[in-house]
Every structure is written in structure tokens, then in C-alpha cells.
Amino acid sequence: MCAAMNNCSGQGTCNQFGFCECSSLAKGADCAHTAVSFKGANSSSISVPTNGTQWFYLQHEPTSPQWSMSLQSNTSSSFSVYVGYGADSNPDQYTYDAMYKDVAPGRTLSFTEQSLGLAPGTGFVAAVQVHGYLTGSNTALENLV
């Protein structure tokens, strides 16, 4: 099965069940995505431009309990977030510990250690799926999250 997954994109190994086990910041079923790391950050800001429906990953390894993370789509597209507990997790739309489905455009989604129910100092990975097509016309939308 890993051959169909681009042999884990050279960023992981194939396990005995035919699934990729990705190395550190490599994420996704075929390890083709690189997570943006917020190791030790209490506040950071990034903008992720997307075109059409796309995935990106955020990895957070806190060094203090006083942190928060916010996501907001600045365009007309909704997004979904799938959270995996532990900085080495690899969540997707089928395997996750917390899910925020179809967050409305313009709405800010914020989380903290407490709101996610994480043990102190536990990291997480957020897989973000930006929904970027107009239904009916199949037109790709450019987004900024």
C-alpha cells in the first residue's frame, strides 16, 4: 500500500500494515506535508494562502501552560480542523482527538491547553482543511487562513 502512497514521500517508513509512519514534521497519509512548528511559542502569527481545497498542518509543543492558538479564514471559505494529541500525532478527517467541522468564514477559532483538554505540557498537531470550491460551479477560491 505504501507504493500507492508515494513510498511515504521519502519522509517516513512503511509499517507492517501498509501505512506510512511519518518522521517528525512530516504529516498526511503519505507524509507529503510539512507541519509548521510552533515549538515553545506562546504567540506566533502565520498566514497560509490556499487555492481550492487544501490541507496544512500546525504542530505545537508548548513550554508553558499559558498559550493560545487562533485560526481565521479571511475569505468566503469555511475550514475544518482535526486535532491530534501529542506533537507526533498525524490527525486527519478519520482519526483525531478533537474536531471543529465547517468553521464559518470570518469566524475565529481559538484553542488553549484547557479548551483542548490537554495535560500540562502536551503538544498537539492540527490538520486544517480549507474548503475552497464553490458548489455548483466547481470554481476554486483563493483563501488566506
Image (spheres, helix red, strand yellow):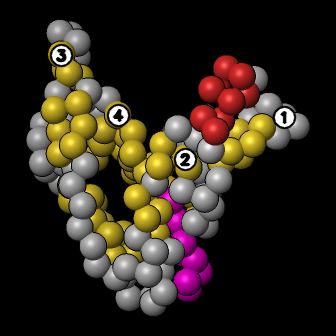
Q: CA distance from mark 2 to mark 3?
A: 27 Å
- Which residue is label 1 attached to? 17
Residue 49, quarter of the rendered image: top left
- Which residue is label 3 attached to? 139
Q: Secondary structure at mark 3?
A: strand
Q: Which span is picked out in magenta?
A: 118-126
In this picture, residue 48 sits left or right of residue 88: left
Residue 12, quarter of the rendered image: top right
Few, some or many residues within 10 Å of mark 1 (<14, 14–19, 20+): few
Q: CA distance from mark 3 to mark 1?
A: 38 Å
- Label pair 3/1, CB-CB below 8 angstroms: no
In this picture, residue 17 sits left or right of residue 61: right
In this picture, residue 130 sits left or right of residue 100: left
Few, some or many residues within 10 Å of mark 3 (<14, 14–19, 20+): few
Residue nearest the observer in this picture, 135 or 36: 36
User: At 39% from the left edge and 45% from the top edge, which residue is drawn?
Assistant: 56
Nearer-N-terminus badge (4/1): 1
- Label pair 2/3, CB-CB below 8 angstroms: no
Q: Secondary structure at mark 1?
A: loop
Amino acid beneath label 3: Thr
Q: CA distance from mark 4 to mark 3?
A: 14 Å
- Which residue is label 4 attached to? 54
Nearer-N-terminus badge (2/3): 2
Q: Secondary structure at mark 4?
A: strand
Q: Position of residue 132 (x, y in %)?
A: 24, 29
